[in-house]
Image (cartoon, rainbow, N blue to C red):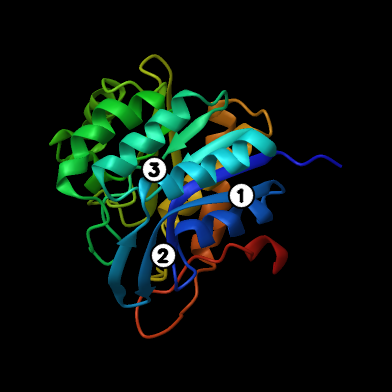
Amino acid sequence: MSLPLVLTVAGSDSGGGAGIQADLKTMLALGVHGMSVLTAVTAQNSLGVHGVWELPEEAVRAQYRAVVDDIGVHAVKTGMLATAPLVETVAELLAGTDAPVVVDPVGVSKHGDPLLAASALESVRTRLLPAATVATPNLDEVTQLTGIVVEDEDGMRRAADAILGHGPRWALIKGGHLPGNAAEVVDLLTDGTEEHWLYAPRYDNRHTHGTGCTLASAVASGLAKGLSVPTAVREAKAYVTGALAAGFALGRGIGPVDHGWGTRR
């Protein structure tokens, strides 16, 4: 049996809740073969990020070429890229790859620790976002990239327009941090013509580490299976909602979502 092939280009989370660890768990849960290009190593646990070490550009390029040139790929997901040289290296690699790309423009960790240098923001806007089939910023990343502070659903529309202005085919604006709605989480998916508003219950669960990585990897998994962008995003949203509901305590801080929730129902 031939499985769809999905490649994550992201940093490592030593606590196992986010980064390439979350990506590969998500891909396994969703029935695709996950592969990885490591961009950075973090010393990270439930309390925060205690250290970050970026890999050299040549190491990132060598990993990517080794996988894509031999095994091939049906979708790529990018996460933590850390620095402008790494962003530009990955954007160059993506430009030569004939597969859909999901860009999660990771800026800060769940604990508020910076994971993207300020000097890399322009490279994300001008090099990485134009390579994206789907860009998946949360509201903090929207502000970081566009200066727009989102406070309501109209603000999400403005944010989507601003993100689309940088070149991705679709923008998925994640509204998990939207103030004022204690009962629901709303996301907006749009290509500038179609609008898809995605609603899910908001669970009273503080263990949400890895949500963004998980969602982007789930979208990439759907695209690798040949699903349309709206269908891939809807299915990814359903998977993440279940993982959030099942998030569990780990260590003394914020625990992860449960990537294997579907096997333990």
Between 264 and 43, which is closer to the camera in this rendering? Answer: 43
Badge 1 element: strand
Res. 204 image quadrant: bottom left
Residue at (41%, 65%) from the top-left corner?
A: 209
Position of residue 5 relative to residue 13, above or below, is above
Which kind of residue does numbered mark 1 sit on? Met
How many residues crowd around disc 1 within 10 Å: few (fewer than 14), some, or many (20 or more)?
A: many
Q: Which residue is mark 1?
A: 35
Q: Which residue is mark 3?
A: 104
Residue at (54%, 60%) from the top-left corner?
A: 243
Residue 86 lies left or right of residue 119; in this view the side is right
Badge 2 element: loop
Q: Of discs 1 and 2, which sits in the foreground?
A: 1
Q: Position of residue 80 (x, y in %)?
A: 36, 51
Dot 2 or dot 3: first in sequence order is: 3
Label 2 vs label 3: CA separation?
16 Å
Residue at (46%, 41%) from the top-left corner?
A: 61
Q: Of discs 1 and 3, which sits in the foreground?
A: 1
Dot 1 or dot 3: first in sequence order is: 1
Mark 2 and mark 3 residues within 8 Å of each other at the beta carbon = no
Residue at (26%, 50%) from the top-left corner?
A: 107
Residue 240 visible in the picture = yes
- Which quarter of the image is occupied by the N terminus? top right
Label 1 vs label 2: CA separation?
24 Å
Between 83 and 250, which is closer to the camera in this rendering? Answer: 83
Residue 195 lies left or right of residue 264; in this view the side is left
Position of residue 91 relative to residue 41, above or below, is above
Q: Of discs 2 and 3, which sits in the foreground?
A: 3
Q: Which residue is mark 2?
A: 208
